[in-house]
Amino acid sequence: MSRVEFAILGAGAMGSIVAAHLARAGRSIAVLARGQRAAHVSQHGLRIGGLVEFTVPVTVLTDPASLRAAEVLIVATKALGTAAALAPLRGASIDLALSIQNGVMKNELLADAFGAERVLGALANTSGELLSDGSVLFTRNVNLAVGEFEADVSPRAQRVALALETSGVHSRAMPRLRDQEWTKFVAWVGLAALSVTTRLGTWKYFSDRSSALVLARIVREAGALARALDVRLADESILPVATLCSATEEQAVDILVKMGEDYRVHSPQHRLSTLQDLEAGRPLEIDETMGYAVRKSRELGLALPLLQNFFEVASAIDRTRRLQ
């Protein structure tokens, strides 16, 4: 296929939301998908519901090697098997690459595939759910941040953010995305732990003071790992991580309970993607996310007992359910 403005790798919830909005805005895009999902999107287009309602046809590529060139590659697959998914794209001319996957390993894999100079940081406070009928429920549209890892806002990051923002996916260019990505990762680790073990919608485990306390403690442990890596934690994420890590436990719980009420009112259907995968019987990204944090902490000689225990429990849940 000839050059496109945006190539989106993955047609799950996030990939579909981004691709559908860009296509509706008139951008030239290609969605790289496979199997039944590729066939469904080819036949029916991308159907978005929830915050907005529309359907748009898109170009679907089932062979990644057929993509010749793209101004921007957005990786939106699950973190599982990312290196293998990127391998067929190494021959393509990719001007910029960014990933909206969970975790922080993604950037190392992109740099290895396309060169560090072509990689932007990205993190999404945006979410949705792929439904059984093939449509996507768009549940949260706060901000998809794009930027350089260690530098101020750049023109190329601004161009990408503007394209997303004007398409309807709220986005802005931000400086020093490494700190922001790690901040989100710290929050996500805690949310994943509670989602897998409680199997509750987000607002419910936020609103209970006992589960909110456990969430706060996991976030504070993961925050200690980030600080050991010289990450400057911030509050501009899915959780106010810097405040949660510096406040007293009681104050942190109060913050989370208040957020639970906000989720209940404004995003009552929100469920972390990990819980969606668990209930759908899909493999979880536990090793690539929580496991990465555990391994990093061991390398640094840092004790994170609560995070370690939740990682083991979540891993066991993922393994044993597939034995049934």
Image (spheres, rainbow, N blue to C red):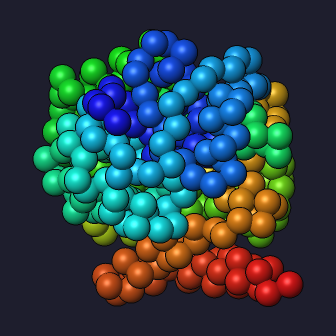
Between residue 321 and residue 152, name the one nearer to us.
321
Residue at image x 54%, y 15%?
24
Figure quadrant of the N terminus: top left
64 in relation to 312, above or below: above
**Residue 279 can be seen in this image:** yes
Determine whether 163 is above or below 275 in the image.
above
Residue 256 spot, x, y in % from top left: 68, 46
Q: Residue at horizontal 33%, vertical 26%?
A: 5
Q: Is residue 200 above or below residue 59?
A: below
| Observer-nearest of 53 and 182 | 53
Task: Locate the C terminus by quadrant.
Answer: bottom right
Q: Is 292 in front, or is 66? A: 66
Please tell me in which quadrant of the rendered image residue 282 appears.
Answer: bottom right
Asked whether residue 124 is in view, the answer is no
Residue at 18 percent of width and 23 percent of height:
155
Q: Where does residue 73 sit, x and y in percent of width and height?
A: 34, 40
Q: Looking at the picture, how far across and down is residue 224, in whole percent?
A: 41, 67
Q: Nearer the viewer, residue 44 or 178?
A: 44
Residue 151: % across, % down: 16, 39
Who's the residue at 49% across and 61% down the image?
Answer: 79
